[in-house]
Amino acid sequence: AIMIVLGTLGKFGAVFATMPEPVVGGAWLSMFGMIAAVGLSALQHVDLNSSRNLFVLGFSLFMGLSLPEYILAKPIKIEKAPEFADILNTLFGTGMTVGLL
């Protein structure tokens, strides 16, 4: 949130724009690593002996990993609404979005 606010100011935006890609990649890696760790720590309170909970967890993981790869290989094509097809391809091409749904 701080980077968004400071990015609206010219000088601070220039500082963030000049950050090397490996530094940005490292920041993304640590951020998503923390998000994954928090998500996994929340699973300690879930009854994994319940078949319903196992199904929800397994289905979310499987779809989040497999559907984006399928969408990248075979994109959705809608002739009458190509913009809508682009939106669907973007949403379903991201594992986090698919796992959320």
Image (spheres, rainbow, N blue to C red):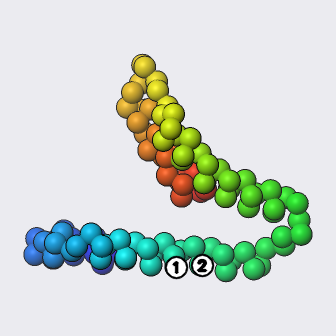
Coordinates of residue 26 in the picture (x, y in percent): 37, 76
Q: Quadrant of residue 15?
A: bottom left
Residue in the image at 65% along x and 50% along y: 63
- The residue under label 1 is 34
Is 26 left, or right, of 40 in this rendering?
left
Mark 2: amino acid: Val
Is 95 left, or right, of 13 in this rendering?
right
Q: Is 9 drawn above or below residue 51 in the view shown?
A: below
Q: Is 14 drawn above or below residue 81 in the view shown?
A: below
Instruction: Report if the CB atoms under discs 2 and 1 are less than 8 Å apart.
Output: yes
Q: Quadrant of residue 52?
A: bottom right
Task: Specify few, some or many for label 2: CA neighbours under 10 Å numbering under 14, 14-19, or 20 or more.
Answer: few
Task: Identify the element where label 1 is drawn.
Answer: helix
Is 68 left, or right, of 2 in this rendering?
right
Q: Which mark is residue 70?
A: none
Residue in the image at 48% along x and 34% along y: 75
**Which part of the image, by quadrant, shows the N terminus?**
bottom left
Q: Quadrant of residue 51?
A: bottom right
Task: Specify few, some or many for label 1: CA neighbours under 10 Å numbering under 14, 14-19, or 20 or more.
Answer: few
Residue in the image at 46% along x and 26% along y: 77
Please tell me which residue lies in front, 6 or 39: 39
Coordinates of residue 46 in the picture (x, y in percent): 79, 73
Task: Identify the element where label 2 is drawn.
Answer: helix
Mark 1: amino acid: Met
Q: Is 42 drawn above or below residue 84 in the view shown?
A: below
**Alpha carbon separation for disc pair 2 and 1:** 6 Å
Coordinates of residue 82 in the picture (x, y in percent): 39, 27
Specify whether residue 23 is in view.
yes
- The residue under label 2 is 38
Specify whether residue 5 is in view.
no
Is 42 left, or right, of 7 in this rendering?
right
